[in-house]
Amino acid sequence: MNESNAPMSALTENSLLLVDDDRAFSTRLARAMEARGFEVRVAESVAEGVALIEEKAPAYAVIDMRLADGNGLDVIARLKERRPDARGVILTGYGNIATAVTAVKLGAFDYLAKPADADEIHAALKAEPGERASPPENPMSADRVRWEHIQRVYELCGRNVSETARRLNMHRRTLQRILAKRAPR
């Protein structure tokens, strides 16, 4: 075993793999995590993430659930195979109980809904096992969460109002009214 693959405790090493296909988000988060003492490597796909894990499995990982070439759960599963002591956090804009349970079973340490900030992510990565996260100071309102979800689906549907309305099981005109308004606070 060469030195770069020698096992180290996740408590003493601060290597971090960030896997997210949103380049602006990953750039901001990488800078914020470097400022907190992490050595950050960034990947934009499942394939890139797995390749970086094969090269050198990190102590920590922040992985987006949905990536262009697959599912972030594949990355967390490979990380846990290569480095069982690694702490992985799954980020997603599509939080639900079933995927949270799957993420934890595959080895994720925590599961955070987007938009999560660097402080929340850092706290999740450094939390002790069984430790409960403190509630956010200013959580998004239910109206804002709904609006964010609608915007995300709208973008994924190529800004097609009819397709978005169909997927959200909502009337097209209702969706148009929601899209015409400003984001709630």
Image: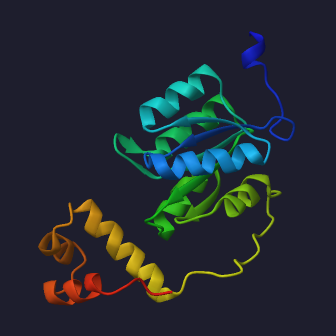
- Nearest the camera: 47 or 154? 154
Q: Is 165 displayed left or right of 72 in the figure?
A: left
Name the residue rendered at 16%, 68% in the picture.
160
Which quadrant of the figure has residue 11? top right
Q: Is 39 displayed left or right of 48 in the figure?
A: right
- Figure colour scheme: rainbow
Q: Position of residue 172 (x, y in %)?
A: 14, 84
Which quadrant of the figure has residue 140? bottom right
**Residue 106 seen:** no
Residue extending farthest top: 2
Q: Is residue 141 above or below residue 21?
A: below
- Nearest the camera: 78 or 157? 157
Q: Is residue 160 above or below residue 10?
A: below
Q: Position of residue 50 (x, y in %)?
A: 51, 30
Q: Position of residue 12 (x, y in %)?
A: 87, 36
Q: Is 122 displayed left or right of 92 in the figure?
A: right
Name the residue rendered at 63%, 63% in the picture.
117
Q: For the image shown, how many numbered marks are present on the structure? A: 0
Q: Is 132 displayed left or right of 68 in the figure?
A: right
- Nearest the camera: 95 or 62? 62
Q: Is residue 54 above or below residue 77?
A: above
Q: Position of residue 139 (x, y in %)?
A: 62, 81
Q: In the picture, which quadrant includes the N terminus?
A: top right
Name the residue rendered at 70%, 36% in the picture.
84
Name the residue rendered at 75%, 39% in the picture.
85
**Residue 163 seen:** yes
